[in-house]
Amino acid sequence: MKTRRWTLLVTCVVVAVLAGAFMITQGETASRIAMIASTLACVAAVGVGLWSGLSGGGQPDFAVRDTGTARGVLGDAVTGYRGTKRQNRSVTVENTGDADSIGGSAITGYSDE
C-alpha cells in the first residue's frame, strides 16, 4: 500500500478511536461537545493535509519496462508506448524489446499520437 493510502487510513483510525474515547468519557455539556468536535476536525485536517501533500515520490503515472519482441505483418509492432500523453501525467519507457513490422510501423520507445 502506498504512503498516501496509509496516511489516510491511519488518520481515519485515529479519528474513530478519539470519537470512541470521547463517547465513553463523562460530561455532555455544550462546551464538551464543541471541544470533541473541534479535536476530531483538527486531527482529520492534519491527516488529510499530510495525505494531499504526499506526492507519488516521483514515480511515473504510466510505465513500460522490460518488454519482449513484437513482430507485425501488415500492421504495427509496439514494444513501448503509443498513445497521447495526458496533461500532468508522466510516461516512462525503459528497456523495451525489438519491434519489426512489414507494412506497418515499429515502435520500441514512446510515440505520442
Image (cartoon, grey):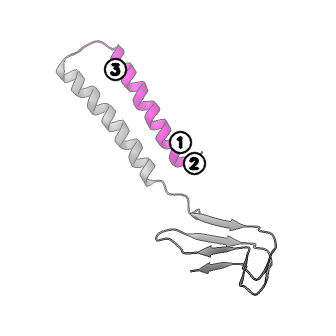
Work out how far the residue at label 2 is from the one at label 3, CA to CA, in angstroms.
Answer: 30 Å
Q: Position of residue 12 (x, y in %)?
A: 44, 34
Could you tell me residue 68's position as x and y percent? 81, 69
Residue bearing the label numbered 2? 2
- Residue 87 pos. (x, y %): 46, 71
Residue type at mark 3 is: Phe
Q: Residue at x 72, y 79 (%)?
A: 76
Residue at image mark 3: 22
User: Is 62 colored magenta in this rendering?
Assistant: no
Query: Hey, which quadrant is residue 93 in on the image?
Result: bottom right
Question: In the image, what residue type sits under mark 1?
Answer: Trp
Q: Please, which residue is most extreme toward the bottom here?
A: 103
**What mark, if any, has residue 73 been given in the picture?**
none
Q: CA distance from mark 1 to mark 2?
A: 6 Å
Disc 3 versus disc 1: distance between alpha carbons? Answer: 24 Å
Q: Which residues are magenta?
A: 1-28
Q: Which residue is mark 1?
A: 6
On screen, 73 above or below 89? below
Q: Position of residue 100 (x, y in %)?
A: 80, 82
Q: Is 26 rendered above or below residue 32?
A: above
Q: Secondary structure at mark 3?
A: helix
The amino acid type, in three-letter code, at marker 2 is Lys
Q: Residue furthest left?
A: 30
User: Does 75 sit left or right of 17 as displayed?
Assistant: right
